[in-house]
Image (cartoon, rainbow, N blue to C red):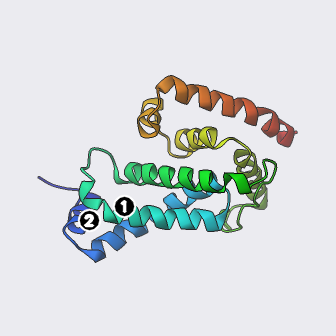
Amino acid sequence: MIFNSEERLIRKAQSGSNKAWLALVRQHEKRLYNQCIRLLRHPDDALDVMQETFISAYQGLNKFDGRSQLHTWLFRIAYNKAAEHFRRHREHQSIDSVAEPSSNVLHMERPLMQAQQNQQIVEHLAKLPFEQRVVVEMKFFQHCTFEEIAQQLDVSPNTVKTRLYAALGRLKPQLEVNDG
């Protein structure tokens, strides 16, 4: 059986190769961090959850059976860690407070206008309830199907659709105002 390079790295990491594990982390850390920042809104929290995710993934790597892609498995772990973090810190956050997106979330090579639009989108996403924000993240940033989202969140596809449409309903007026 011929494995692709990621599958080879996974098998080596499962066999105890730290070098293979670090290569997997490098392949997925930027994408995972971006997921975490969109979910949690704060760079330090995103970094903490990303690190917790990689620690949990490393500890449970032998349980990864390859039925899903590694990034899907990592996102599921990150989602659970982010939800736990959100529950722990919810009482300390004001409903109206929105953390400023970190400058490292925005790519410096993009024109200023694109960076400002991205910042506005992140700010609007931050105002969504966590459950809606997760669905938007998975649908538009991870390009998951409704069924994949439902499976990862352990809810029905109809619940996923309801959360997505509710989020879009909340985002639409805010984004239309910004487009002017």
Q: Residue furthest left?
A: 1
Establish if 168 lies above or below 179. above
Local secondary structure at mark 2 = helix
Q: How many C-alpha atoms fall within 10 Å of the one at disc 2: few (<14), some, or many (≥20)? A: some
Q: How many C-alpha atoms fall within 10 Å of the one at disc 1: few (<14), some, or many (≥20)? A: some
Name the residue beneath numbered marker 1.
57
Number of disc labels: 2
Image disc number at residue 90: none
Q: Amino acid at mark 1?
A: Ala
Name the residue beneath numbered marker 2.
9
**Where residue 25 appears, x then y in whole percent?**
40, 67
**Res 99 seen here:** yes
From the viewer's side, name the closer residue of 169 and 56: 56
**Where residue 87 appears, x then y in whole percent?**
60, 50
What residue lies at 74% left-to-right and 58% top-to-bottom? Answer: 115
**Where residue 34 appears, x then y in whole percent?**
57, 58
Q: Nearer the viewer, mark 1 or mark 2?
A: 1
Establish if 148 lies above or below 11. above
Q: Is residue 101 left or right of residue 22?
A: right
**Res 27 seen here:** no
**Where residue 46 appears, x then y in whole percent?**
59, 62
Q: Amino acid at mark 2?
A: Leu
